[in-house]
Image (cartoon, grey):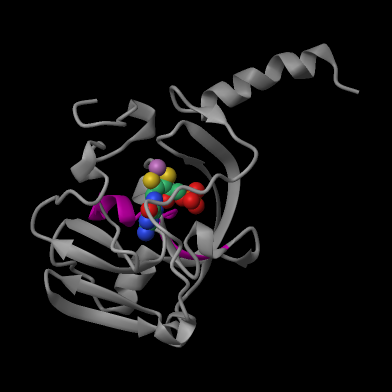
Amino acid sequence: MVTRGFEGRRPTVVAGRLPPGQYLAHDFPVLSAGPTPRLRLADWSFTLKHGPRPLARWSWAEFGELPRSEIKTDIHCVTKWSKFDTVWAGVRVADLLAAAGLAEPPTAFVLAHGFDGYSTNVPLADLMGEQAMVATHYDGQPLAAEHGGPARLLVPHLYFWKSAKWVNGLQFTEKDTAGFWENRGYHIYGDPWREQRFTGD
Ligand SMILES: Nc1nc2c(c(=O)[nH]1)N[C@H]1C(S)=C(S)[C@@H](COP(=O)(O)O)O[C@H]1N2
Ligand SMILES: [Mo]
């Protein structure tokens, strides 16, 4: 039985968690610029680079030895759906950099790259928080290929296009450098709370 009072309170709870212009989705839409790459774990690797120079590289087995974390968070897509309480597990970017011995990262800007050629820029500061990770599991299961499996970047406080699927590396860049969607009119930063959807927002 649902009482009036309960129904009446619910929109307030949603309003405080839902960024402007977003609606609450209960399914998990798939959005990709191209076909889903089918990656063999034996061919998978993850590389940290400074410009063209490799700094560290992990095979799938090596990546599995890194310290792991689980988080529950809300995600917000620029196409206006949001999803609450999504559960992810993987390796925090901060832990990755520590494992690579990068106590002093070479620059303040990062381009994330995917096996499909996708890229997206994220300031390093946004990757150093508790919630930014290279996620290998969603909802307790290995991440499905269409959602970026075997591993995707997760930067949940920015619009979801920043969460590069099929991620294969992070590249430090001297300047904040536009990636795939940022070069096609999407906002260079993409804060859902400031509704930074498109260039100039
Ligand atoms: N490698 C890669 N990552 C990507 C994309 C892509 O096309 N390729 N699309 C982005 C966009 S625009 C969105 S909204 C989210 C969608 O993630 P989902 O399919 O898991 O919902 O992935 C982002 N990451
Ligand atoms: Mo998107």
* Residue 63 within the magenta-colored segment of the rendering: no
Outermost residue on the right side: it is 1
User: Looking at this rendering, what residue extends furthest in the left direction?
Assistant: 174
Picture quadrant where residue 159 is located: top left
Q: Residue at x 65, y 63 (%)?
A: 140
When the figure is inspected, residue 187 is found, relative to residue 73, above or below; the finding is above
Q: Position of residue 34 (x, y in %)?
A: 38, 56
Image quarter where the C terminus lies is top left
State the image quarter where residue 94 is shown.
bottom left
> At x 17% / y 48%, what residue is drawn?
178
Q: Is residue 133 magenta-colored?
A: yes
Residue 3, quarter of the rendered image: top right
Q: On the picture, is 35 further left or further right than 9?
A: left
Q: How many marks?
A: 0
Q: Please provide the residue range marked out in magenta.
A: 121-137
Does any portion of residue 50 appear in the rendered image? yes
Does the rendering let one see residue 157? no
Q: Position of residue 164 (x, y in %)?
A: 37, 57
Q: Nearer the viewer, residue 25 or 5?
A: 25
Residue visible at 34% across and 27% down?
195
Left or right of residue 162, residue 175 in this image: left
Expressed as whole percent of the image width and height from the top left, the position of residue 100 reads 28, 78
- The location of residue 30, given as percent across then percent down, is 51, 49
